[in-house]
Image: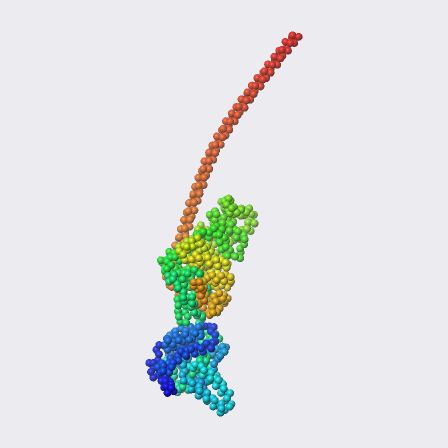
Amino acid sequence: MWFFKLRMEGGRRRLRYHLLPFLISKEGKVYELKTTMDAKILYFKDETAWVTMLSFLQRPWYRRLIKQDWISWEIVADKDEIRYFVWVPNEHVGRAFKSKYYAEHPEVEIVEVEDRNIDFSRPHAGTKLFTESHWTVPIKTYHNEVVDTQSELIEFLDSLEDGQEIHMQFLVQPAYGTEKDFRGIVRQFHKQGIADESLEKDNELYLSAIEGKSTRILSRMGIKVVAFGRNKRDAKALIKSAKGSIGTFSSGRLNQLRGREWWWFRTIRPLFRWEFKNRIYPMERMKKRVILGTEEMAAIMRLPSEKVQNNKLNRLKMRFTPLPKELKHAKFDPNLTISLGVHSYHGQKTDVMFDLATLRYHAAFIGMSGMGKSTAMYNLVEDLIKLDGAGTSIGGTVIDPHGDLCQDIAARIPSEKQHLVRYIKFSEGNIPFNVYDVDFALTEDKIAQTVADVLKRTWKDFWGPNIDDNFLNGGIALQRVGEASLPNLQRLLSDFEYRENVLERLNRSDPIENDLYLYFANLQSLQDRELQQKTNSTLNKLRKITLSGVMGKMLRAKTNGLRFRESMDQGRINLLDLSELTSDEKKLIGSMCLTFAELAGKSRADTPAAERHKLPYHFVMVDEAPTLMEHSTDAIESFASELRKYKTSIILGMQGLKGQVPSEVSDAIFRNFGTFISLRLGNPDDAQVVNKSMPSEILTDRDYLNIEPYHGYIRMQVGNERTRPFLLRMKAPGPALYKDAIPAIKQRTIDEAMEYEKKFLATEAVVEDRQEEEEVQDYDSYLVLNEEVAQDKDSIDLLIDIEGEQTLHEAEYLDSKESSSKQEKNQKERSSDEKKKEHISVDDLLV
């Protein structure tokens, strides 16, 4: 009874679709299979995939009476490409096939495609393959992973020329009722061995192979090949070559595949074409069927490995990766979240979201030119600016050495937010750019040292202690007297009279200014030769800057048109275009802007911790960062860790690492940047560094060299966790709707900066006028005082004259009195003498 049912069921199945063609599935789907360039030979995994698939397709006999599904493994080749497909009767079987195949080959991608329309009106020929011996005897199989069974076949398909095409079809469904055939063939070999002992050894080989095949799941196969040629003769020649290319599966001592000739009396051609087009098994007896075990199927129906080197194979140029579990369970605020792109893996597509909390851990893009790095960067800026939940509370500073990035961003900023944009093209030389003028709290020595450090990075091979001293002391001194600028620093070092003027204005009662006075007073006292040794190196660098036709005018300004802290706190977008500058000018201006943006971000520390959540987000984006950012490891880590606290992020764009960024600096970037996106790299050394820094069980160094344009492997920071790298298709850029607004934005930026410069000059003029008035008043007071003093002096002189005359009169009076006294005394003496004479005469007379 069972045998009768089986025979009836087999006969019905053979004729069912031929007699009732409306039963042929109209829901069939075609998938293309693509493997990676470095696919390995894994026969065991291929066999396991077919075992699980056949197990899924198996049905009990009573269900097979109604329906038995099958699939078709297909190879299509022409002069341009070689492709592998699988046809399934419906979506249910398709999902099962993908699940079973992915389980063993996760590196493969199975993509649904349109079914091909085969045009049999072209010159063609065909053949149906069968086994030379009974199907119970296996064909040649391979156990080691050295020989790729697809090599000979691919070599033939590679030889196709214009107008030639090959279609191979392998129908697969479970085989039933095979036990009787195995028992019969075994009995037959035993009888032959008893009858002829010389066959015993060969029969043992056959029996061992047959027993091995009988233990495996078996599949009924329908193998057909169609060749299209330039003419019928060409098509027949191709069929002959196609049959020969399958020689890899032929075993001289066991079984082999043969092809039926394309003769009208051997092949009913209309039926063959109909069966091929509808993927129908041919009508054939059990003995004539091709039944293969899963080991044989794994040798024939598999994808080529890396050992098959052929440019026509339609392979994956990059490896697809699963979506990290951290992203699957991540929860983002939709009002503060943007889409970075689409993740695709095994037919499933997922939008990858990126929020401001992730941005605070900083981001870096790396990839060679033309791979979509700049596109990804301006897409990110455009979406951040348009965030509905952020309003005007997010801004940024973009430093672009080439200019294209700034233009692409500006062309996509909607009109309602264009008032927040400042676009500066430095090569036009119209913006005030005094590097000593900052709008955040910074000490004079810090400003002077920052300018010196930036210039030192520009000329790092031509720097010395004298230059450091001149920039530091000169910068502080000029800030103290209110005339700080690079051109004035040049004057201070080269102009004796200007230096003398500065010295006169320094307050020596201040210890710092006294030190500055002594430093420059020493310069004043030096001989020409000694002075040149002290200042020439510094002046050489300053002249390169101040004599520049572009930079000289900007640097002579009193103010800086870039108000970094103001931009951060007001949510403004600064687009700094460094294109058309020399290499040194780009490095100087770019480094200066980056450094001041960093310091402005850190100056947000003056905001109380409880109020910092109100600060607007601000990102600092630097394209071609290695040319502008030659910080030490400590500086990178400080930059990344400190700025995060103040809602300031940095986004770097780089073409490579090796030879551009020191290894310790690149290590610091990988350590401190939460999001890292690698597009295709051009240097194997870079690929090695990136793969080592973003470890993955799936990716290799080679994968980073084979990424297709606008794709990248990305590692993201999700909360406190970092994901494994996964493949992302970057979002396509939106249209540049506002390109015409760029000139107006640039002009408004210049007007605002010049207005600020004029106000400063006007204020400075008022102060100078006031000082001049005070000086005039002081001078007038001085004159009055002098006059009063002069008058006082005249009075004193008169008094002195009067006193002199009085003294003279008194002296004359005394002299006169003294003279009178003397005369009176002399007279008395004369009178006394006369009396004496008189007395003697009387006496004499008396005698």
Q: Residue at x 44, y 88 (%)?
A: 184
Farthest-out residue, top: 846
> Where does residue 221 sit, x and y in percent of width and height?
41, 82
Examine the rendered structure and indicate whether residue 353 appears above or below residue 559: below
Residue 479 x, y percent position in the rendering: 47, 49
Q: Is residue 561 above or below residue 716?
A: above
What is the quadrant of the N terminus in the image? bottom left
Q: Which one is in front, 556 or 352? A: 352
The residue drawn where x is 59% and y is 17% is 826
Q: Position of residue 40 (x, y in %)?
A: 48, 74
Quadrant assignment, res 30: bottom left
Total numbered labels: 0
Picture quarter containing residue 364? bottom left
Inspect this view and state whether residue 590 appears. Answer: no
Does residue 251 lie above or below 812 as drawn?
below
Question: By what rule are the colours in the image chosen?
Answer: rainbow
**Which residue of the protein is positioned furthest toward the right in this rendering?**
847
Question: Residue sitting at 44 percent across and 62 percent down?
Answer: 720
Residue 795 in percent (x, y) is at 48, 30
Question: Closest to the observer: 427 or 846?
Answer: 846
Left/right of residue 202 with respect to residue 98 in the rendered view: right
The quadrant of the picture occupied by the C terminus is: top right
**Taking 301 as reference, is 805 above or below it?**
above
Question: Would residue 617 be seen by someone viewing this image from the given angle?
Answer: yes
Looking at this view, name the residue that lies furthest to the bottom: 195
